[in-house]
Amino acid sequence: MLFPTPLVPGRLLRRWNRFLCEAVLDTGETVRAHCPNPGAMLGLKDPGLRVWLEPNDDPRRKLRHGWRLVEFGDGHWAGIDTAVPNRVVREALEARQIAPLAGYGGVRPEVAYGTRSRVDFLLTEPGLPDAYVEVKNVHLRREDDWAEFPDCVTERGAKHLRELVEVAAQGHRAVMLYLVQRTDCARLRMAGDLDPGYAAAFAAAAHSGVEMLCYDTRIDPMGVRLGRPLPVEVPGL
């Protein structure tokens, strides 16, 4: 996934709220930008962080910039836009780059299922069971090379896990795919201290036939691309 407009660098001044931040560009201009991430963003919203923004000239938008990346001093990157993972995964699915799902040629986004929910992708292929794929954005890192999910309480996320359990019970493939939008992580675990309910739902789903996949990403100011598969820690397995 390539950014349609070249990004511009700057320093974060503050994140005002879930959807608004302020940064000073390298040009010296101070701008307010859309923050496309309603989560806690632990470790990614500290004043002074190197950030990359995407400018736009759309007259329908109130803000002329959107926050896309954090660049760490050690050469690593993090993507903060929660809409990016679905775009990256869709491109990868259509190119058959995700090995456990490479047998599927039909890729349909946003298909209704469960209780007033829409699965991120429904994969179909003659002779194969349908595969229901939910995608989650991961960008929390607190210890060593562990990526963790979630970074705050997400009842919606736990609901998706429960619905995937029902899908698996019906004989379909049920897949939770975690996309790590960081370049400094090598494995994934659940952040049970931040959301015990989600961690419990994750363990129950994994033991009930839901497939847990995780991939990292390659990130630079040009775009975000699918990286390598990462191991997922599942209690009891």
Image (spheres, rainbow, N blue to C red):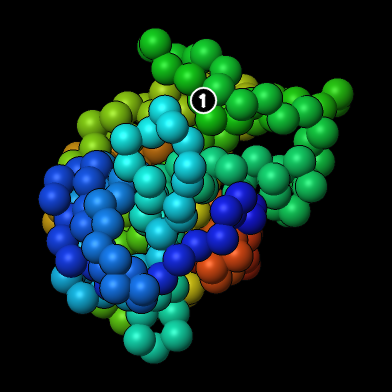
Question: Residue 9, how many percent across, how many down?
Answer: 41, 71
Question: Residue 33, how many percent across, how many down?
Answer: 30, 50
Up/down of 161 relative to 92, above or below:
above
Q: Residue at x 25, y 52 (%)?
A: 32
Of residue 12 and residue 177, the one placed in the foreground of this image is: 12
Up/down of 108 relative to 150, above or below:
above
Q: Quadrant of the C terminus?
A: bottom left
Up/down of 237 relative to 102, above or below:
below
Of residue 46 and residue 181, the one placed in the foreground of this image is: 46
Taking the image as shown, residue 231 lies to the left or right of residue 191, namely right
* Mark 1 crowd level (few <14, some 14–19, many ≥20, 10 Å Cα): some
Taking the image as shown, residue 132 lies to the left or right of residue 57, namely right
The answer to whether residue 128 is visible is no
Of residue 9 and residue 135, the one placed in the foreground of this image is: 9
Question: Residue 113, how many percent across, how many down?
Answer: 50, 15
Q: Residue furthest right?
A: 126
Q: Residue at x 23, y 32 (%)?
A: 155
Q: Which element type, helix, strand or loop, lies under badge 1?
A: strand
The answer to whether residue 16 is visible is yes
Q: To which residue does mark 1 refer? A: 119
Q: Residue at x 81, y 41 (%)?
A: 103
Please identify the quarter of the rendering in which residue 6 is found.
bottom right
Question: Residue 178, how many percent across, how many down?
Answer: 47, 51
Q: Residue at x 54, y 41 (%)?
A: 86
